[in-house]
Image (spheres, rainbow, N blue to C red):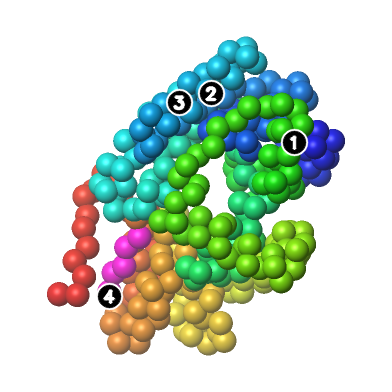
């Protein structure tokens, strides 16, 4: 496992020997193994643990376990407790999304305050496969079927080469203690349904399903790179930028055979949904002047151009739909 990790880090240029790595440690097998391996490789590491206060005493025991790990390795450690349910309700998002937003915002804050150059998470191959099926079920473009990327900004995922079972077996062989999260057994979360029901069924068809999916995801990634390059070249034909404002030539867009796909690929990184893209296309000829909003941008459909620009964060705005 140690050799495979070292090779994976080098092959994907995840980090350098002089990086200061903040390791996200939940107390589960994957994060405990990741911390142990990075320690063996003598990287400069610190750890961060989030208590999402979702499992009562069990969450508190996880925190105590991770504090003991920090003492064992004699490394700097950071701990925080989130009111995750309240945050989810206030922002009208799922518990899973709330936990994700809270932890990554905090990780980035810790990096800014302490000079950490990388954030390492214990995501593994099974997580990537589950993400593939989650995105497929919810609806996605080609990027959504490429699984979890090895890097995203300063975030690195060094264990993506290994399956969950391989990690747990390594932990047992190395006599590493870890915590089991009882929420992983609950079928109220879609990811757990995929983990416990869908993937085991697919493994009855092909016992090597995880290895096959690893190759599939690799192939999809290569296809996505070609696709994204082609999209970028086509977009350059009718998108221009002036200062902070971008504009799309409507006639050129309409003359394209791929206007729906191209507009979605251009607008989705700006926070616009697929449904918004469909509505924008529907009003190009009959509703000049209509305005659309994402969380970060506003879009105006004019006679000849679609104008997109960042919203002024100092202004309060709201949207009334279907009057």
Q: What residue sits right under mark 4 in the picture?
A: 289
Question: Looking at the image, which residue is at 34% across and 74% down?
Answer: 301
Q: What residue sits right under mark 3 in the picture?
A: 61
Question: Looking at the image, which residue is at 65% across and 16% down?
Answer: 73
Q: Is 50 left, or right, of 17 in this rendering?
A: left
Q: What residue sits right under mark 2 in the picture?
A: 66
Q: CA distance from mark 2 to mark 4?
A: 55 Å
Q: CA distance from mark 4 to mark 3?
A: 56 Å
Where does residue 63 sit, x and y in percent of width and height? 47, 25
**How busy is the neighbourhood of tag 2: few (under 14 within 10 Å), some, or many (20 plus)?**
many
Give the magenta-colored segment's residue range: 290-294
Whether residue 241 is visible to the viewer of this picture, yes or no, is no
Question: Looking at the image, which residue is at 62% across and 44% down?
Answer: 123
Q: Secondary structure at mark 4?
A: loop
Q: Earlier in the sequence, mark 3 or mark 2?
A: 3
Q: CA distance from mark 4 to mark 1?
A: 60 Å
């Amino acid at each position: 496992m140690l050799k495979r990790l070292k090779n994976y880090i080098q092959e994907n240029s995840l980090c350098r020997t002089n990086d200061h790595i903040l390791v996200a440690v939940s107390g589960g097998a994957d994060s405990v193994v990741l911390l142990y391996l990075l320690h063996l490789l003598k990287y400069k590491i610190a750890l961060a643990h989030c208590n999402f206060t979702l499992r009562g005493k069990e969450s508190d025991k996880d925190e105590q376990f991770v504090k003991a790990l920090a003492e064992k390795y004699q490394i700097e450690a950071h701990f925080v407790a989130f009111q995750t349910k309240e945050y989810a309700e206030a922002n009208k998002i799922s518990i899973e999304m709330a936990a994700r937003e809270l932890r990554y915002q905090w990780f980035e804050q810790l990096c800014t305050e302490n000079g950490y150059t990388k954030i390492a998470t214990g995501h593994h191959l099974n997580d990537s496969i589950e993400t593939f099926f989650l995105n497929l079920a919810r609806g996605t473009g080609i990027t959504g079927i490429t699984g979890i990327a090895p890097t995203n900004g300063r975030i690195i995922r060094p264990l993506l080469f290994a399956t969950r079972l391989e990690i747990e077996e390594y932990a047992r062989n190395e006599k590493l203690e870890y915590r089991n999260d009882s929420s992983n057994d609950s079928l109220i979360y879609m990811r757990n349904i995929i983990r416990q029901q869908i993937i085991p069924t697919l493994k009855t068809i092909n016992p090597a399903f995880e290895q096959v999916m690893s190759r599939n995801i690799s192939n999809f990634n290569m296809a996505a790179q070609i696709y994204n390059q082609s999209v970028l070249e086509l977009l350059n034909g009718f998108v221009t930028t002036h200062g902070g404002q971008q504009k799309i030539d409507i006639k050129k867009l309409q003359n394209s055979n791929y206007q729906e796909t191209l507009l979605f690929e251009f607008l989705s990184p700006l926070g616009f949904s697929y449904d918004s893209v469909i509505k924008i296309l529907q009003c190009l000829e009959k509703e000049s002047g209509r305005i659309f909003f994402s969380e970060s941008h506003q879009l105006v459909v004019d006679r000849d151009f679609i104008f997109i620009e960042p919203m002024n964060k100092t202004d309060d705005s709201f949207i009334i739909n279907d009057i």
